[in-house]
Amino acid sequence: MIALLLAACSFGPAPEPRPEGVPAGVAFLRYSGNDLMLDDEAIAPWTQLREEPDLPFEPLEKALEHRLAKEAGTWVALPGNSTWGEARRALQAVFQAGATPVWLGALGTKKAFGPLDNAPGGRAVPSCPEGPVPVVGVGRRMTIELHADDKQTWADASVRFKPLVGGSGQPVLAELMDRRCWAETTCAALEVPDEVAACEEGAASPDPVTDRVEVAGEHGCVVPFAKAHDHGSWPGELGKSLGRLGIGAETSTMVMGDETVEYEAVLAMLEGLADEGIAKPQLGLLRMGSGDTADPCDAPIRDEKALKLAAARWFGYQLAHGGPE
């Protein structure tokens, strides 16, 4: 028994089990006691992640910059009950240092989501030097925002419409596309009769047609309200909502959250997205704040047909008015 105790003291705590899919050689970021640890090095008290949330977290950034093979990436395994604000600030340092991609998981669990490189989906088309660009339909960019108060956590989801640009290969979602770049086309390009009619309705609208709509599942929320440490139903519920909306792997997606949202809530959302084939969402790393009032669960777009008709109306308005700014 004494020999076993001496051996335990000599070698320290057992290493954290590495989740499947996280390669050897990546940096390992976690909490241990009061410390934020990078591999076996204490970087700073983890509570410092809560201080000055709008400033870079230099202790971690500097430690990563001097790490050999930082390009291998970083495995982030914080406690599930830590806050997204803590994780967000640590991730800012990781991305700033170039220690990417990242895998996100909770300390002591066997799941990690990644590799995430935080690249936005789609392609920037800020100008059209070779002439008008063929727009073949409407693409979608989904944003999921997590909020929390002192009793519960909830999620808002919205979809922003973007032009789909044709060419060689699959159509590409176009970001920042100048309104002058759209090649001439008509509502008939949408082919489906109901969508063509909605497109013509949008073209005839005297008022601007929004490019952003709130979306949800059957009951008006994308996932049900959850109490602290109780997000286990979210992956399955998110899958049901996305299935009703016809949102799948091709949808460019961003996940962001209030500072006070539990880290495990973000992981539950990433799990639900991964189950639907959205394996590399972008992480919103700008501070959102906190203290929002719980939403009434009344998102108007709740199924695939309604979402497609809203997209078609936007498309028609753009065709009639010269494309998006």
Image (cartoon, helix red, strand yellow):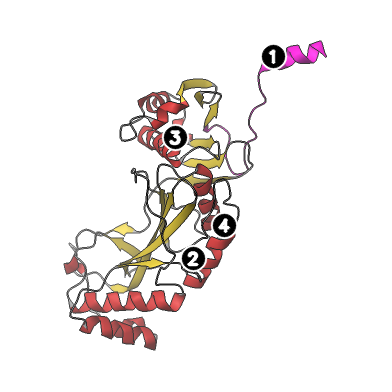
Percent position of residue 254, x then y: 40, 54
User: Of callouts 2 and 1, which one flags the residue occurring earlier in the amino acid sequence?
Assistant: 1
Specify the amino acid type for callout 2.
Answer: Gly
Which residue, given by chain and number where applicable, does mark 4 sit on? 235
Comparing 313 with 103, the one in front is 313
Percent position of residue 69, x then y: 47, 29
Going by the image, does 15 lie left or right of 47?
A: right
Q: CA distance from mark 3 to mark 4?
A: 30 Å
Percent position of residue 26, x then y: 52, 33
Element type where label 4 sits in the image: helix
Q: CA distance from mark 1 to mark 3?
A: 33 Å
Q: Is residue 213 above or below residue 235?
A: below
User: Of callouts 1 and 4, which one flags the residue occurring earlier in the amino acid sequence?
Assistant: 1
Q: Quadrant of the N terminus?
A: top right
**Image quarter of residue 124:** bottom left
| Crowdedness near tag 4: few (<14), some (14–19) or many (≥20) residues, C-alpha within 10 Å | many
Specify the amino acid type for callout 1.
Answer: Cys
Element type where label 1 sits in the image: helix
Task: Single out the residue that lies furthest toward the right.
Answer: 1
Q: Nearer the viewer, mark 4 or mark 2?
A: 4
| Crowdedness near tag 3: few (<14), some (14–19) or many (≥20) residues, C-alpha within 10 Å | some
Q: CA distance from mark 3 to mark 2?
A: 30 Å
Which residue, given by chain and number where applicable, does mark 3 sit on? 71
Element type where label 2 sits in the image: loop
Q: CA distance from mark 4 to mark 2?
A: 14 Å
- What residue sits 47% from the left and 71% below the top? 245
Is residue 68 in view from this perspective? no
Which residue, given by chain and number where applicable, does mark 2 sit on? 248
Q: Mark 3 touching mark 2, by CB under 8 A? A: no
Q: Nearer the viewer, mark 1 or mark 3?
A: 1
User: Of callouts 1 and 3, which one flags the residue occurring earlier in the amino acid sequence?
Assistant: 1
